[in-house]
Image (tube, rainbow, N blue to C red):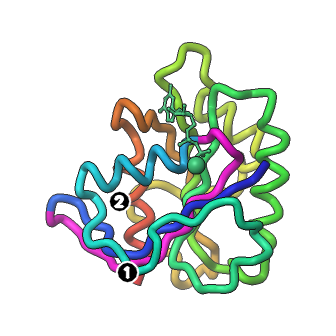
Amino acid sequence: MFLFDWFYGILASLGLWQKEAKILFLGLDNAGKTTLLHMLKDERLVQHQPTQHPTSEELSIGKIKFKVDAVVYLVDAYDKERFAESKKELDALLSDEALANVPFLVLGNKIDIPYAASEEELRYHLGLANFTTGKGKVNLTESNLRPLEVFMCSIVRKMGYGDGFKWVSQYIK
Ligand SMILES: Nc1nc2c(ncn2[C@@H]2O[C@H](COP(=O)(O)OP(=O)(O)O)[C@@H](O)[C@H]2O)c(=O)[nH]1
Ligand SMILES: [Mg+2]
């Protein structure tokens, strides 16, 4: 099963940066999308709610017709049996015309659980080992590459995803 949540508002972090953005949260069911959305609101990483409903789930990806600024793709790093399924969905998204050039932040979630996959393992199983564009500040405007990176996180422990959002925010105009 493949679901999405979405968010439209201002992404902000302690006044360090602030970007108005429409962000799609994608991933298999149980990956942590709804938990992340709630956490961002609680931490005030996300300001002001849209007038429309903030989340709408259980719609198929084929129905996405609006433009988004970034995709956050969540993977349960502990659920190794579903990596292949998650890769298949990710591949479809990466080759989707409607999402061409949209920055992708891949979050490997649940690293608080012992034996969760490492970042290297996750990159390998998602087929991203040679396709990520680099952490930190990387200027991609001339290379025509789609920004794509993997960050490991534990949403419940409030770890890791902040760096991911900071990374993706540099590619949101
Ligand atoms: N151990 C652990 N569990 C998590 C984490 N994030 C989410 N979960 C749990 O994973 C389950 C699915 O999360 P949910 O946000 O509903 O997933 P969604 O289907 O992608 O929206 C819930 O039981 C969450 O409490 C995490 O960082 N660590
Ligand atoms: Mg959900």
Q: Where is residue 32 in the image (x, y as percent from the top left)?
A: 55, 42
Which one is earlier in the sequence, the residue at label 2 or at label 1?
1
For label 2, the crowd category at 10 Å Cα-Cα, with few meaning under 14, some 14 to 19 and many 20 or more, is some
Dominant secondary structure, magenta: strand
Report the residue at 81% width, 59% height from top. 91
Residue 34 or 70: which is nearer the viewer? 34
Cα–Cα span, label 2 and label 1: 25 Å
Q: Is residue 92 left or right of residue 24?
A: right
Residue 100 in the image: above or below residue 169: below
Q: What element carries label 2?
A: helix
Query: In which quadrant will I find the C terminus?
Result: bottom left
Q: In the rendered structure, find residue 166 and report the number of the disc placed on it.
A: 2
**Magenta-drawn segment:** 15-31
Residue 108 in the image: above or below residue 170: above
Q: In this view, does 47 lie to the left or right of 137?
A: left
Residue 13 in the image: above or below residue 140: above
| In the image, residue 26 lies in the stretch drawn in magenta | yes
Q: Which of marks 2 and 1 is in front?
A: 1
Does the image show residue 160?
yes
Report the residue at 40% width, 58% height from top. 165
Q: Position of residue 171 (x, y in %)?
A: 45, 74
Report the residue at 71% width, 47% height from top. 28
Residue 22 or 161: which is nearer the viewer? 22
Q: Is mark 1 on a helix, strand or loop?
A: loop
For label 1, the crowd category at 10 Å Cα-Cα, with few meaning under 14, some 14 to 19 and many 20 or more, is few
Reading the image, the residue beneath label 1 is 51
Q: Is residue 114 left or right of residue 170?
A: right
Name the residue type under label 2. Lys
Q: Mark 1: is the Cβ under 8 angstroms from ligand 2?
A: no
Query: In the rendered structure, are the residues bearing label 2 and label 1 in contact, judged by CB atoms less than 8 Å apart?
Result: no
Q: Position of residue 114 (x, y in %)?
A: 55, 14
